[in-house]
């Protein structure tokens, strides 16, 4: 889930993420170590999730114990050794971007979008090159890369004066699950009109902030955790495995 649920919401699996197989309800447990694997979770490597477990006795009185959230994040299959930056100053037709990835074998996508469409941009949008500005030479899709420095030159972008644009690069590991890579921060492009001024900064990027959690201590319940909930293995795009021990 993306927020801290109430006990009643846990019992009904309210706002549970992914398919039905990515959550479990009313499962019998014993006193001792327990492990459950959730599948079909449809996670994104761009987000941090929280896994929860709720336990109670068999009297069905909703008076059990809700675990603290366990942050769950998909391990990315590639990353940026050097964040994308512009090479020189973009023109309305040509844009050049330099970057380097960490994986020895990877795949990359890049495009320029109108800033109004930036709210739609994520890994899936980059892979589909959806909302890309300009012609086919102003984007790059599913291009094989290694971990050496890359310089990509785009042409035929047909950008317009007075319209803000953002350029993005997305990389993932070769053969990895779709969406298990990393999306760059946005690189800003703007061509001012005759009555405007604008100082170009080739290193300017705009990155998302990290999530933070404030955990509250649980109170007395009809059941409790003798070993806290923890992730039992690496989180993937489709699978989360949690383990715990109940009294």
Image: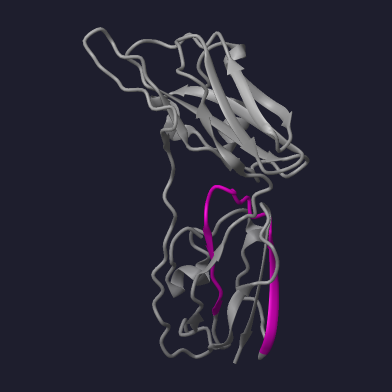
Seen at 64% across and 42% down, the residue is: 179
As displayed, is residue 77 above or below residue 95? below
Q: Quadrant of residue 80?
A: top right
Residue 80 vertical placement versus 113 (above, below): below
Question: Is 90 within the magenta?
Answer: no
What percent of the width, then of the height, locates residue 225? 56, 86
Point out the stretch of residues depicted in magenta: 32-54
Residue 93 image point, x, y percent: 50, 9
Q: Quadrant of residue 181?
A: top right
x and y, in percent, of residue 43 in the image = 60, 51
Residue 48 is one of the magenta-drawn residues: yes
Q: Position of residue 10 (x, y in %)?
A: 50, 70
Q: Is residue 212 left or right of residue 123?
A: left
The C terminus is located in which quarter?
bottom right
31, 134: nearer the viewer: 134
Along the line of sight, the residue nearer the viewer: 140 or 242: 140
Residue 239: tell me if it is visible.
yes
Residue at point 29% right, 20% down?
Answer: 198
Above or below, 19 relative to 113: below
Q: Is residue 106 above or below residue 97?
A: below
Residue 30 seen from this side = no
Choose between 65 and 127: the one closer to the eye.
127
Label count reads: 0
**In the figure, is residue 61 to the left or right of 29?**
left
Left or right of 186? Residue 17 is right
Could you tell me which residue is drawn at 59 percent across and 27 percent down? 110
């Amino acid at each position: 889930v993306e927020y801290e649920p109430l006990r009643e919401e846990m019992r009904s699996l309210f706002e549970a993420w992914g398919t039905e197989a990515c959550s479990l309800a009313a499962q019998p447990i014993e006193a001792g170590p327990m492990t459950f694997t959730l599948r079909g979770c449809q996670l994104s490597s761009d987000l941090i999730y929280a896994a929860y477990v709720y336990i109670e006795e068999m009297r069905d009185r909703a008076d059990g114990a809700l675990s603290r959230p366990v942050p769950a994040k998909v391990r990315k299959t590639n990353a940026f050794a050097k964040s994308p930056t512009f090479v020189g100053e973009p023109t309305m037709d040509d844009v050049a971007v330099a970057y380097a990835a960490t994986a020895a074998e990877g795949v990359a996508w890049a495009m320029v979008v109108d800033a109004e469409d930036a709210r739609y941009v994520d890994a899936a949008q980059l892979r589909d090159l959806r909302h890309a500005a300009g012609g086919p030479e102003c984007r790059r899709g599913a291009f094989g890369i290694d971990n050496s420095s890359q310089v990509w030159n785009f042409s035929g972008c047909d950008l317009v004066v007075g319209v803000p644009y953002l350029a993005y690069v997305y990389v993932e590991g070769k053969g990895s699950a779709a969406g298990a890579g990393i999306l760059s921060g946005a690189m800003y492009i703007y061509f001012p009109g005759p009555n405007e001024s604008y100082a170009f900064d080739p290193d300017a990027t705009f990155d998302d902030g990290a999530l933070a959690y404030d955990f509250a201590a649980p109170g007395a319940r009809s059941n409790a955790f003798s070993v806290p909930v923890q992730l039992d293995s690496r989180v993937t795009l489709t699978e989360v495995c949690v383990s715990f021990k109940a009294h």
